[in-house]
Image (cartoon, rainbow, N blue to C red):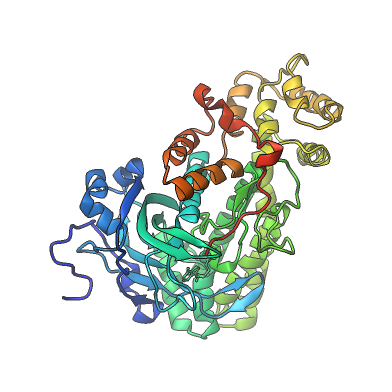
Amino acid sequence: MIKGIHLNAPLFGFDNSYARLPEHFFARLSPTPVSRPRLVSTNEDLAVHLKLDPALLDSAEGTQILAGNRVPGDAEPLAMAYAGFQFGGWVPQLGDGRAILLGEVVDRDGVRRDIQLKGCGQTPFSRNGDGRAALGPVLREYILSEAMHALGVPTTRALAVVTTGEQVRRERSLPGAVLTRVAQSHIRVGTFQFFAARQDTDALRLLADHVIDRHYPDTRESAQPYLALLDAVVDAQATLVATWKLIGFIHGVMNTDNTSICGETIDYGPCAFMDTYHPDRVYSSIDHAGRYAYGNQAPIAHWNLAGFAQTLIPLIDSDAAQSREMAQEMINTFPAKFEAAYNAGVREKLGFQSSKEEDPVLMEDLLTVMADHHADFTLVFRRLCLLETDHRSADGVVRELFDEPAAFDQWVVRWRARLRDEANGEPGRQQRMLTVNPAYIPRNHRVEEVIRAAEDHGDFMPFERLHQVLRRPYAEQESAIQYQNPPRPEEIVQATFCGT
Ligand code: AMP
Ligand code: MG
């Protein structure tokens, strides 16, 4: 059989630009088949968007493909090479240790998308890993990534989940699964660092050109395309991490190998949405020092981008000192870009259409009261939408979220005073606020509940139900009010795990 051609297998309409890069960018190999694949879920809307046939994905043959047992005829399966800084420590070779890129399709919007199987067997980059994924983390990634998409956050997406019929060994034996992941690309800061560490400037240039063509075509027109690329990546990350902060999302493992070049949220491991607000909140069981705490995410993104800038120095200018200086200047723009994106989002969350210098302080003061009095992040902002500008009759719904309700009263007086400054801001204010302050987030205890039911009882109903609710996070859904509720004390999830 010729490599990449699988006789009689259906075609996906793949056009594989990454596979056309030099052979040392990846390892070509097919997924390792599993014994008894069973379809759990396919994402029909996404399939249609990708111009894939949902009926094929739902068929017995589709299950074989999504499990890695058969490979579409036009796929060119490969595992990508990359490196990365993990918790600040350099790891010269990581790479797809349990994921295989099947190929790329161009979707209905003309956007190129990777289709990747995650958990589909060992690759040359597996190190000591088994190349597999457990069902729990796969369902987590499916729910979280699709919820992020519905919330309007740039993210990889989930096309399907199949169980493998095989057990994987972690702390205990767990059912195995394969996630089909879709991304604008799986190129990471760590992909650049892989070649930079090997001083392979030719490869860096090819990679940078590939990224420019694929994600940032406008930068091609610039007098300094690689500097413009850096600018664009800094922009994308600043906006992304600001968006995370605005919805209470904690990625949990912001290593450079988990930092996507196109600015999508990628590699959902021990990530979590906060319940009660605290800037130091950490869920990941392995993040002992709080490096990736909620409030640290912007400085960490800045640090990761400095690492990216470093890799571009040989490309930006032939004079290394000059190049370094330009890269440094560009990296220095991150904090201001982040603040601008965050503050714009803050104004929307608080219902302001105009911008006042004191707005960030007003937000910060609310957050401080929330932290001091254990208020639920999502519910405070959601219910703030319901408050009247001119009287206080409705305030109780927000006050009751603070363990000392009076703590909210001083702040809300200031908020109302600020609202009165808005020229004609009242019409539509509530409606605008409701479209940026979600009612439904994938709360940790709900995600846990889904995983428990699936792992312990093979019951995927809670998964389906939660996923359906999270498709419309900004809409009030009468039959799903309970999904808005924070955990009861005994339901609180203290730690999350990568499950690798
Ligand atoms: P992650 O924590 O998922 O971002 O993974 C970090 C690195 O470890 C990547 O290179 C993964 O491919 C690799 N990895 C994680 N889990 C496994 C596994 N079970 N088998 C092989 N490689 C893995
Ligand atoms: Mg990763």
Which residue sits at x=42%, y=62%?
A: 167
Quarter of the image for residue 317 reads: bottom right
Position of residue 140 in the picture relative to residue 21 (left or right): right
Q: Residue furthest left?
A: 8
- Residue 40 lies, with reference to residue 353, above or below; the image says below
Quarter of the image for residue 98 reads: bottom left
Which residue sits at x=51%, y=79%?
A: 93
Residue 443 visible, this angle? no
Q: Residue furthest bottom?
A: 199
How far across and down, in percent of the image, does residue 429 sit? 63, 23
Quarter containing the N terminus: bottom left
How far across and down, in percent of the image, does residue 454 sit? 45, 47
How far across and down, in percent of the image, does residue 291 sit? 71, 63
Which residue sits at x=49%, y=59%?
A: 262
Q: How many marks?
A: 0
The answer to which of 242 and 461 lies nearer the viewer is: 461
Position of residue 118 in the picture relative to residue 321 (left or right): left
Residue 138 visible, this angle? yes
Position of residue 137 in the picture relative to residue 303 (left or right): left
Position of residue 82 in the picture relative to residue 102 (left or right): right
The answer to which of 376 and 69 lies nearer the viewer is: 69
